Image (spheres, rainbow, N blue to C red):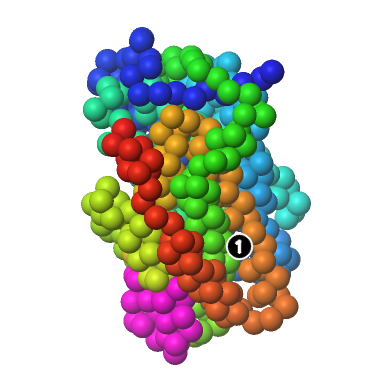
Amino acid sequence: MTSVEIPTPGSAAGQPSPLRGWLAVLAVTLGIFALMTSELLPVGLLTPIGSALQVSEGTAGLMVTVPGLVAAISAPLVTVATGRIDRRIVLAVLTGLVGAANLASAFASSFAIVLTARFLIGISVGGFWALAGGIAVRLVPERHIPRATAVIFGGVETASVLGVPAGTLIGDHSGWRTAFAAVGILGLLSLACMVCLMPKVPAERTIGLAGLPKVIRGNAGLRAGIAMTFLVITGHFLAYTFVRPILQEDGVDGSMIGTMLLAFGVAGLCGNFVAGALVAKRLRQTVAGISLVLASAMVLLLASGGSAFTAGAVLLLWGLGYGAVPVTFQTWILKAAPDATEAASSLYVSTFNLSIALGAFFGGLAVDGLTTTSVLWIGAALAALTLLVVSGTRDSVSLREREAHL
């Protein structure tokens, strides 16, 4: 049976030198930054892309739905299918694919071509993120694993902080095609770094595809983490995917939106650091805080009243809350399943990206069928529901024991 690698700390006998290991970590971080920027880039460019390719904003939201849905499926499948292949080769191929797909989008003459390219990006995002979740244990000494993992997943947050806002600014000033081309070039640069800086990372311990459900079966902590990820990410992207038309409908000048999304990203980076300092001892409280902040921000945006200052302040709050999401939920998943990091990460990535897809899809239906601002109410409700899951969990002895491993 085809199988996947489940790395464990200290398992790599031929571990690279600390310097080369950290260079490899940085290469992986650049790769995940490029991939996540690619996946989320359309968020800031829905209106101009829809106008240029003659589709509605709800239909344009499929550019977020398609890669999210494909990534949800590809995360476990790519991980399983490449189980015996050198991880450096797999990650390099996936990074090169996302670069080529973005360049194809830049020259697309129809929306169908763009969606085909977004399909390929979904394959890359799902497979790359799932493997990157456990790759740090193969690259750096055991004592550096938590820090290296945080650096790698900092690429996810940095995509929101720098990638999407920068892409939006490029799109506003030079056209959306230029923005896609820039991200495509970034993907090819990531490929070069992967090839030059990353050592061979051969497969070690493996598990069959049929074994993936066993990772979550009987693990209440992991199931809770997956459920909370689904609620928070679906709620966030149901609303955030359409933040540009929401702001424009509210009277905010379109030329200011790129800057406001940049402020959102900077706040997100702050949220990442705040959460990083809290999750070690206050993981459940941090998750509850994220839920409250996101729900509150979405409701407050409804009351911004067309003021760019007020809307910007609300986006800062929203960014602060969402910035805490990747490090918090990734920490929850790794703590819940420390002996199956890659398998658990693939399930987490699958859920994360499925939630992006569903959020964007149902948000599009709400925007086209109800009102643009309806997505804020729905997103806030889903985020608030996370509190019920958190309140239903308790720090069991087994979870505390698992936390000790990290």
Work out whether residue 197 or residue 14 is closer to the camera in this orientation and state it. Answer: 14
**Magenta-span inclusion, residue 298:** yes
- Residue 100: in sight, yes or no? no
Q: Is residue 48 left or right of residue 148?
A: right
Indicate whether residue 127 is drawn in magenta: no
The answer to whether residue 80 is visible is yes
Residue at 51% from the left image edge and 69% from the top image edge: 385
400 left or right of 74 in image: left
Predominant secondary structure, magenta span: helix
Q: Is residue 277 above or below residue 263?
A: above
The location of residue 203, given as percent across then percent down, is: 51, 16
Depth check: give the residue in front, 271 or 249. Answer: 271
Q: Is residue 194 above or below residue 126?
A: above
Q: Split into 4 quadrants, where in the image is the N terminus? A: top right
Image point (70%, 50%), residue name: 115
- The magenta segment is 295-319
Indicate the quadrant containing the C terminus: top left, top right, bottom left or bottom right. top left
Residue type at tag 1: Gly
Q: Residue at x 30, y 19 (%)?
A: 20
Residue marked by disc 1: 359
Tell me residue 15's x, y (percent): 34, 14
Q: How dense is the environment of label 1, judged by Cα within 10 Å: few (below 14), some, or many (20 and up)?
A: many
